[in-house]
Image (spheres, rainbow, N blue to C red):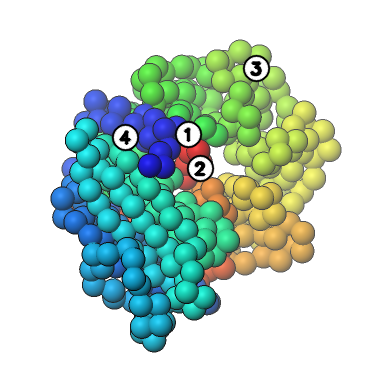
Amino acid sequence: MYTMKKLNQVWLAAGLTLALCGTAQAQMRIEISGVGSNQIPVAVAGFADEAIAPQQISAIIKADLERSGAFKLIDAGVITSMSNIDYAGWKAKGADALVIGTVAKAASGDYEVRYKLLDTVKQTELSQLGLSRAPQYTRLTAHTIADDIFLKLTGVRGAFSTRISYVKEYDKRHYELLVADADGEDEQMALRSNEPIISPSWSPDGTKVAYVSFEQKKPVVYIQNLITRARTVVANEKGSNSSPAWSPAGNKLAVSLSKDGHTQIYTVNADGSNLRRVSNSNGIDSEAQFSPDGNSIYFMSDRSGGPQIYRMGVDGSDPKRITFSGNYNISPRISADGKTLAYISRRDGNFQLYTLDLATGQEQRLSDSTDDQYPSFAPNGRYIMYATQAGGRKSLAVVSVDGRVKQRLTTQAGNIKEPTWGPFMQ
């Protein structure tokens, strides 16, 4: 059987370990609008004997694929045998691909899941996996299969088995730092505080989250280890300590500090040592983000009179302005391939999500709401999560980078904000 020990360990860190702090009661509701430009017709059959598992694996796979907007799902009922497939019959029903599988319970208590992805046009097998996992990893098993389907049919790695983190606020007196599946399910609490929590940021290996807490009556940067539960103070200098962002190597962070009078960007080792100032302006420099290759830092600065996005060397050299449309651009985020910049821009009084193609300079507005904040790319670069507000409630939204597919994630209790999308975990 095919196993993913490291992925299991990280999910244990980000899920079961967090259960020691308690599980949030309210789960998210997802509303989906729009579809991809070229949907792939896929039939997903119910897995044989999947009723014995804690959750229905085929249903989770279907929900993942539907949420992506890249697939047109075709009802396939339940297929109990993984052999003697009627390829022509499924093609006649409009399916270019067919997903089938089986579930069995091993003597150890693990659930053994086998799956196949079949090409009905060429009448060939595109992929197969065998996964043996403990009951608590049922959702992970389904997400892993959905990731494989997404990769085999689109050529892009799926991000369904990744995790997200965000802050939930209750009446400005109760704050929780939460970790959940990419679809908002399996929500677990990492930290609870009576003071604000802001700016969570995943480490590149997915085992830690940096964030800012006001529990000392001022903003201080911490790192929470999701495996050991250990918490480290990274920056607690005079004044404000904010906006942590990990380097690609995971050994240091960029932070924004006001220790010298006005906010500038510093780098610091993950253990809090070797604090070093890297930006040098008479304005405010903040919201740093490392480029994927680690050689540059994108950041927000008002040195030109209003907030704009700049890029400089990781040592602070050669700062150059990147955004020129609009007079208010903040919260830079760079895609994993380094080609696309996402940010929040204020136009006509509205704060909305934009992207910029760094090669062509082409700008695109991706949201139609009026109060968007904190964009975060999915690790495969296909989607962007951000915080938004509608009807007096703060929630999360996800949009595809072409703007065609949009999702809104809401919950019955609390305002959801400050999202960050975790990395691939293997």
Give how far across and how far down residue 100 sits, in percent. Answer: 33, 63
Find residue 399 and report its horizontal and vertical position in percent: 48, 62
What amino acid type is highlighted by mark number 4? Answer: Gly
Q: Nearer the viewer, residue 402 or 379?
A: 379
Specify which label sits upstream in the sequence, 1 or 2.
1
In this rendering, position of residue 358 left or right of residue 224: right
Instruction: Give the residue displayed 24% in from the left and 25% down from the top.
Output: 20
Q: Which numbered disc flags the more N-terminal residue, 1 or 3?
A: 1
Considering every residue shown, the one lying at the far top of the view is: 273
Q: CA distance from mark 1 to mark 3?
A: 23 Å
Precedes in sequence: disc 3 or disc 2: 3
Residue 232 lies, with reference to residue 386, above or below; the image says above
| Direction from residue 368 to residue 1 in the image, left or right | left
Give the secondary structure at mark 1: loop
Question: Which residue reaches farthest bottom?
Answer: 92
| Front residue of 165 and 70 | 70
Reading the image, the residue beneath label 1 is 206
| Residue type marked 1 | Gly
Which of the marked residues, 2 or 4, is nearer the chain's N terminus? Answer: 4
Name the residue beneath numbered marker 3. 275
What distance separates the C-alpha of mark 1 from that of mark 2?
A: 8 Å
Pointers 1 and 2 in contact (CB under 8 A)? yes
Could you say which quadrant of the image residue 147 lies in?
bottom left
Residue annotated with mark 4: 15
Residue under the point 37% across and 65% down:
99
Q: Is residue 107 left or right of residue 67?
A: left
